[in-house]
Image (tube, rainbow, N blue to C red):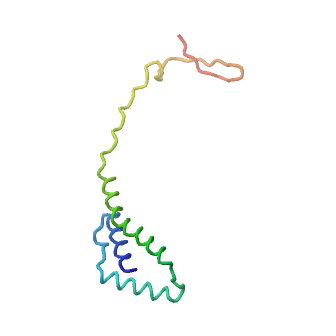
């Protein structure tokens, strides 16, 4: 059971990273699962409720099937067009007119154009 999950997880990872070299075959998955089981046997008891295990496997299988498809669909979407840059209105553009400072109480010095 763990071997199948590992194989599917590697398929999903390969699809997500667009790297087919990450896919492992059943033999590699079995070897990896055995090694993981051996290490875990020293640390934890893996008594998992069968319903929980089945839901977990469903999530792994569904992720392996739909994950790469979703990522591929997202990558194939056309980019949103950028709106054209709007030109700043003429009256707001900076000019090189001569200015003079005017003190406005409560505001401070303000540069005002000289006509």
Q: In which quarter of the image is residue 6?
A: bottom left
Residue 49 x/y as whole percent: 50, 78
Give residue 5's quadrant in the image.
Answer: bottom left
Q: Which of 80 and 1 is in front in this view?
A: 1
- Residue at the location (33% across, 39% down)? 81
Quadrant (top left/top right/bottom left/bottom right) for the N terminus: bottom left
Furthest toward the top, the residue is 115
Q: Is residue 55 above or below residue 79?
A: below
Q: 14 or 6: which is nearer to us?
A: 6
Q: Is residue 68 left or right of residue 92?
A: left
Q: From what the image shows, is residue 40 above or below residue 98?
A: below
Furthest residue toward right: 106
Residue lying at the far front of the rendered structure: 51
Residue 66 coordinates in the image, percent (x, y): 34, 61
Question: What residue is shown at x 55% (from left), y 13% (from top)?
Answer: 114
Count of residue discs = 0
Name above or below for residue 88 compared with residue 36.
above
Would residue 40 appear left or right of 16 to someone viewing this image?
right
Q: Which residue does the image show at 35% across and 63% down from the upper left?
A: 16
Spot occupied by residue 12 in the image (x, y as percentages of width and height): 35, 67
Would residue 58 be found to the left or right of residue 77 on screen? right
Q: Position of residue 102 (x, y in %)?
A: 64, 17
Comparing 104 with 65, the one in front is: 65
């Amino acid at each position: 059971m763990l071997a199948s999950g590992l194989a599917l997880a590697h398929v999903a990872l390969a699809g997500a990273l667009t790297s087919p070299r990450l896919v492992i075959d059943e033999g590699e998955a079995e070897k990896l699962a055995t090694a993981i089981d051996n290490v875990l046997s020293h640390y934890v008891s893996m008594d998992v409720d069968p319903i929980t295990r089945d839901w977990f496997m469903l999530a792994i299988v569904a992720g392996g099937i739909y994950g790469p498809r979703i990522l591929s669909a997202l990558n194939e979407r056309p980019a949103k067009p950028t709106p054209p840059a709007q030109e700043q209105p003429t009256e707001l553009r900076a000019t090189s007119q001569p200015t003079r400072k005017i003190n406005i109480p409560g505001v401070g010095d303000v540069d005002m154009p000289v006509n």
